[in-house]
Image (cartoon, rainbow, N blue to C red):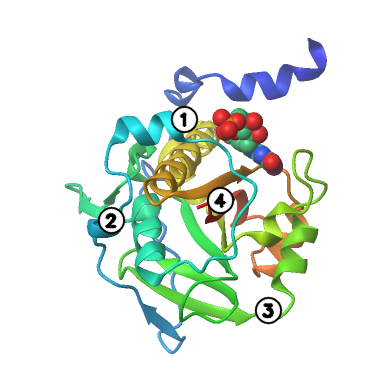
């Protein structure tokens, strides 16, 4: 259909077009930061070493079979060990390639890893309610700011949820992944954007499976207010913006 032409083309591979393009990498332009820099004077919180002893389900088959989008959460607190594991499972660094790019628990086109993980923390043991950012190289949390009415703000950002209205405000933690597209554009130019969306799908799927292994419920969120969340997280909306969210909490009847 004509009205979808542009969007459908976006879904297709355009690597033939890329053959005729000199990317910024080929032009010798400097490689962008592989992770977002931060002020070393910020409040940094250490995360416990990832410890698989906390897993409730260790069988991949069981996790795949039982995974569902869960939108009802108990009021049970999540431990820092659990949060540490979930962050490692979604963006944790497990190696480097021969040009020094990070290799992580998720695959990513060209190891460009254009994502940052922001957290709406509402019910995690030892952490005050507020907005945090994951520092994958250090495996630590950066405290950004407190947000007293965090659940209300998240509810507004999550717009009119069609399945279970207002479910995000009951989550213990909601993950919000931003992209900094130039990390991928530098290398893939016009082919970057389709890849970024595929890449972030892997991140969220790892959250689903890691959540399931801890007997937690996860629900992906594609319906959200772009401007409101970018403003709240102090992202410029051009060089960095949110592209996907997921709510998480302990399952209700456990
Ligand atoms: C990209 C994407 C966006 C989604 N956005 C939402 C959302 O905004 N709200 C919601 O309740 N569920 C959302 N979901 C969850 C889907 O509705 C769910 O995956 C689907 O109904 C299949 O159910 P299952 O995950 O339990 O197998 C999203 C899932 C994906 C993959």
The furthest residue to the left: 98
The furthest residue to the front: 253
163 horizontally vs 246: left or right: right
Query: Label 2, on which residue?
Result: 93
Residues under numbered marks 2 and 3 in contact, where contact means CB atoms less than 8 Å apart: no
Give the crowd class for mark 2: few <14, some 14-19, many >=20 residues within 10 Å: some
The answer to whether the residue bearing label 3 lies less than 8 angstroms from the nearest atom of ligand 1 is no
- Seen from the viewer's position, the closer of residues 46 and 227 is 46
Query: Label 1, on which residue?
Result: 21
Distance of mark 4 from mark 3, alpha carbons? 29 Å
Percent x, y for residue 100?
22, 54
Q: Which mark is residue 147?
A: 3
* Mark in the foreground, 4 or 3: 4
* Mark in the foreground, 2 or 3: 3
Identify the residue at horizontal 45%, vertical 22% (top origin): 15
N-terminal of the two: label 4 or label 1? 1
- Vertical position of residue 250 compared to residue 38: above or below: above
Identify the residue at horizontal 40%, vertical 56% (top origin): 86
Residue 178 visible in image: yes
Which of the four quarters of the rendered structure image does ligand 1 lie in?
Answer: top right
Residues under numbered marks 1 and 3 in contact, where contact means CB atoms less than 8 Å apart: no
N-terminal of the two: label 4 or label 3? 3
Percent x, y for residue 234?
66, 70
55 horizontally vs 124: left or right: left
N-terminal of the two: label 1 or label 3? 1
* Mark in the foreground, 2 or 1: 2
Distance of mark 2 from mark 1, alpha carbons? 31 Å
Percent x, y for residue 194?
54, 31
Distance of mark 4 from mark 2, alpha carbons? 33 Å
Q: Which mark is residue 253?
A: 4
Residues under numbered marks 4 and 1 in contact, where contact means CB atoms less than 8 Å apart: no
């Amino acid at each position: 259909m004509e009205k979808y032409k542009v969007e459908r083309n976006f879904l297709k591979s355009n690597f033939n077009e890329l053959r005729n393009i000199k990317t910024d990498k080929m032009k010798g332009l400097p490689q962008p930061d592989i992770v977002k820099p931060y002020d070393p004077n910020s409040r940094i919180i250490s995360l416990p070493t990832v410890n698989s002893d906390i897993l409730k389900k260790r069988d991949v088959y069981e996790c795949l079979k039982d995974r569902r989008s869960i939108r009802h959460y108990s009021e049970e607190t999540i431990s820092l060990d659990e949060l540490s594991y979930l962050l490692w499972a979604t963006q944790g660094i497990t190696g480097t390639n021969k040009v020094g790019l990070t290799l992580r628990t998720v695959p990513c086109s060209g190891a460009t890893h254009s994502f940052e993980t922001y957290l709406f923390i509402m019910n995690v043991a030892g952490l005050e309610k507020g907005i945090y950012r994951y520092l994958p190289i250090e495996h630590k949390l950066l405290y950004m700011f407190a947000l007293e009415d965090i659940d209300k703000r998240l509810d507004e950002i999550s717009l009119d949820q069609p399945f279970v209205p207002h479910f995000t405000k009951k989550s213990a933690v909601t993950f919000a992944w931003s992209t900094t597209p130039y990390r991928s554009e530098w290398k893939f130019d016009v082919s970057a954007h389709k890849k970024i969306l595929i890449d972030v799908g892997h991140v969220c799927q790892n959250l689903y499976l890691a959540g399931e292994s801890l007997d937690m419920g996860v629900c992906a969120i594609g319906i959200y207010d772009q401007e409101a969340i970018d403003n709240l997280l102090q992202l410029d909306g051009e060089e960095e913006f949110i592209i996907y969210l997921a709510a998480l909490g302990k399952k209700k009847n456990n």
